[in-house]
Image (tube, rainbow, N blue to C red):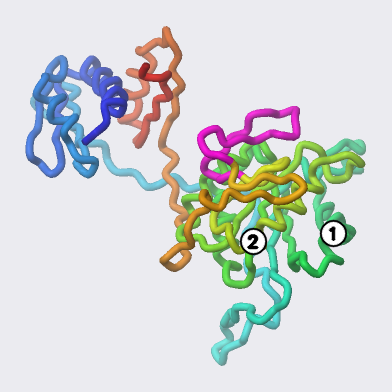
Amino acid sequence: MIRRSTAVLITSALAALCTQHESVTFAFSPPSSSFDIQSRPSRRFWSRLLSASPEHVIEIDVDVGNGDETTTPAPSPLPIHTSAARDAGPLFKEEERREEGDGSFTVIPHRGQFRKRVLILCTGGTLTMSVDPTNFNSLAPVQGALTDYLAGMRELTDDPEMPEIISHEYKPLIDSSDMGPGDWAMLARDIHTNYYHFDGFVILMGTDTMAFAASALSFMLQNLGKPVIFSGSQIPLREPYNDARKNLIMATIFASSDTVSEVCIFFHDRLLRGCRSTKVNTSKLKAFDSPNLPPLAEIGINIEENEHLFRAPPRGSFRINTSMDTRMITLRLVPGFDDASIKAIIDAARQTHLKGLILQLYGTG
């Protein structure tokens, strides 16, 4: 049955439709019953709605004329999103590519190596900032800076218990506020290309939209059996005092973990589930939080893992889904909002092929 809290949201949308159009038809699927509503839904309609199963999708036909005809907008293709950067492509070692007779290559998964391997994909962000001589020596993300820093970090290169690291910096580096579905799809494709050649992945990016990217990849990377750890910093790695070094090292450690098989964010001293994280502060080192789920792990003298929160290993083969429909709007409503604006959005949705309207409301009491 549909929960009454869900029905409250449906009520708001239906009421707006009923006040804007002369005739609205609501059909339940499977087609057990339908209702023609001229002004307001009847008691029988709401009884049918509240008793509907989740799979009984509601189909809505809106008559904008005198109630004699219904119009259906023509289907439109999914929006196309691209990235300013190019896909990294295969980043595994050349000896793992076996040339076939027809000139193609077969990828040979790595086996029998003593050290694990982690792939670091860097899109930019505060962590990579350095003095840019081409921009009056101001701080800006600098191409190649991360590669130079990694080569000089003895914690990563000299400790035999640390994984082998291969890094890739996208060109150009992308400000996180400019990242969107096209960039998320690029990251997903590169993880898919290199999936069987690395034990885990670290994605370094700016913090402004990190929670959005981590949440998106949580759903784009399906049947994920390896850790994908997002991280960044509030202070550039080049500064004497920074949070970037610890975040980078700990993200790499968790990316080589055998217990993590999902998309996460590591920041400050906590490992958070990617699709439960949000940025809560722009001026403190504890920039991210997971309000509705405890951290998966916390860092102190030891690493304290909440093992009961870890996702179970997948049962299916790894695959990605990069088709994202962005034809949606999110509205946060506060007391006293003008409902005429919502009605206008619903009217405009017929011309713009809007697929979803999410209303963020206050508690139901």
Residues under labels 1 and 2: Cα distance? Answer: 17 Å
Please provide percent x and percent y for residue 79. Answer: 44, 45
Q: Which residues are magenta?
A: 272-294
Please provide percent x and percent y for residue 145. Answer: 84, 52
Disc 2: which residue: 257
* Residue 70 visible: no
Q: Earlier in the sequence, mark 1 or mark 2?
A: 1
* Amino acid tagged 2: Ser
- How crowded pointer 2 is (Cα within 10 Å; few <14, some 14-19, many 20+) is rated as some
Classify 232 as above or below 94: above
Classify 314 as above or below 249: below
- Left or right placement of residue 35 versus residue 245 in this view: left
- Left or right placement of residue 164 versus residue 188 in this view: right
Please provide percent x and percent y for residue 102. Answer: 54, 89
Residue at image location 45% in from the left, 14% down from the top: 334
Under tag 1, what secondary structure?
helix
Quadrant that contains the C terminus: top left
* Disc 1 and disc 2 in contact, CB within 8 angstroms: no
Classify 5 as above or below 265: above
